[in-house]
Image (cartoon, helix red, strand yellow):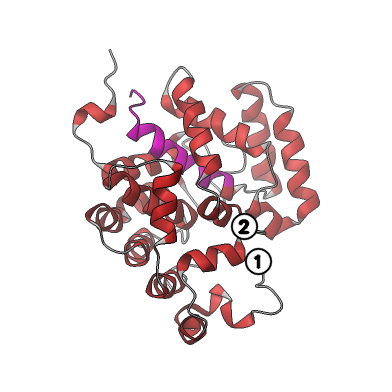
């Protein structure tokens, strides 16, 4: 008989760490690392190590430390493995969700309150996090080169001069980045995918894989757009929509890996959804 994880004394930070582990263990998630396949430069063990390394930052989020500091700490810990960036986007979503859960309001309104209360200092910490790992990002708007996240800490003066909070930074990015849209839109896709995981049947890792496929059909994956362009990202959506079960998804996974297509932003959102499902008692 399975026991809801919420009955085992796990707090939000432990749930978030577990969500990171379950996300990478779910298979197949076409184009992403899972327990059956690696990418050329990112391996399963890198993700396991990154998840464990992020735990101190997740604990800070649960304890009430500012979102920016908790996020940068989590990213710094995640980076202590040889693969590079494994879960930057996951942590960007998880940290405010953990904070909302710790306050007792893990809901669209609750997490919106958390992200809208972020400060300029949080934005500076967010930019500093880019100095710990290389993150694939698109170019900044033509009228805002000083806000290129790749500048890291060097962007601090621009952030302070413009009094930009971390939520403001996400608003500037929301049109072209799905994770930023989660921040500014009440984590709509996250909570919807969490409901799908909770309403599904079977092992949680299978539920996560199916939720990933559903998300992949909804809109172009940001990371695929960044690396391959909009047309390829829309082709990825169409190919995912043609998949009827996890068996067919396994074939698609092999194809995406061979083609170098990595829908990593969709994986970020399903990781966040897994956290919400864990908080709401999905059984393991």
- For mark 2, give the secondary structure: loop
Query: Badge 1: how crowded within 10 Å, few (<14), some, or many (20+)?
Result: some
Q: Is residue 175 above or below residue 139?
A: above
Residue at left offset 64%, top offset 81%: 145
Query: Badge 2: how crowded within 10 Å, few (<14), some, or many (20+)?
Result: many
Residue 45 visible in the current orientation? no
3D distance between C-alphas at marks 2 and 1: 9 Å
- Mark before the other along the chain sequence, 2 or 1: 1
Residue at left offset 74%, top offset 34%: 239
Residue 24 in percent (x, y) is at: 45, 40
Q: Residue furthest left?
A: 9
In reply to whether residue 125 is colored magenta, the answer given is no
Front position among marks 2 and 1? 2
Q: Quadrant of residue 82?
A: bottom left
Residue 107 visible in the current orientation? yes
Residue 218 in percent (x, y) is at: 68, 38
Quarter holding the C terminus is: top left
Q: Which residue is mark 1?
A: 138
Residues at circles 2 and 1 in contact by the CB criterion of under 8 Å: yes
| Main SS of residues in magenta | helix
- For mark 1, give the secondary structure: loop
Say left or right for 247 vs 9.
Answer: right
Say left or right for 139 vs 210.
Answer: right
**Where are the magenta residues, as a range?**
266-284
Q: Which residue is mark 2?
A: 177
Residue 160 in percent (x, y) is at: 46, 83
Picture disc at residue 10: none
């Amino acid at each position: 008989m399975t026991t809801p994880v919420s009955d085992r004394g796990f707090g939000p930070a432990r749930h978030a760490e577990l969500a990171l582990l379950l996300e990478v263990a779910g298979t197949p998630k076409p184009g992403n690392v899972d327990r059956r396949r690696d990418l050329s430069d990112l391996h399963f063990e890198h993700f396991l190590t990154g998840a464990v390394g992020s735990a101190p930052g997740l604990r800070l989020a649960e304890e009430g430390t500012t979102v920016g500091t908790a996020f940068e700490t989590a990213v710094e810990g995640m980076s202590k493995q040889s693969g590079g960036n494994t879960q930057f986007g996951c942590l960007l979503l998880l940290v405010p969700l953990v904070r909302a859960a710790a306050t007792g309001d893990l809901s669209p309104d609750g997490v919106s309150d958390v992200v809208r209360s972020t400060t300029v200092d949080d934005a500076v910490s967010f930019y500093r996090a880019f100095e710990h790992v290389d993150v694939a990002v698109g170019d900044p708007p033509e009228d805002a080169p000083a806000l290129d996240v790749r500048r890291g800490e060097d962007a601090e003066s621009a952030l302070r001069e413009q009094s930009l909070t971390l939520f403001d930074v996400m608003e500037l990015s929301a049109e072209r980045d799905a994770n930023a849209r989660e921040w500014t839109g009440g984590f709509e896709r996250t909570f919807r995918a969490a409901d799908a995981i909770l309403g599904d049947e079977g092992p949680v890792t299978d539920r996560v894989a199916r939720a990933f496929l559903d998300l992949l059909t909804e809109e172009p994956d940001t990371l695929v757009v960044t690396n391959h362009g909009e047309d390829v990202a829309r082709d990825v959506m169409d190919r995912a929509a043609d998949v009827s079960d996890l068996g067919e998804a396994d074939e698609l996974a092999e194809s995406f890996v061979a083609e170098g297509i990595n829908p990593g932003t969709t994986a970020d959102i399903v990781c966040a959804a897994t956290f919400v499902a864990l908080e709401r008692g999905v059984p393991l």
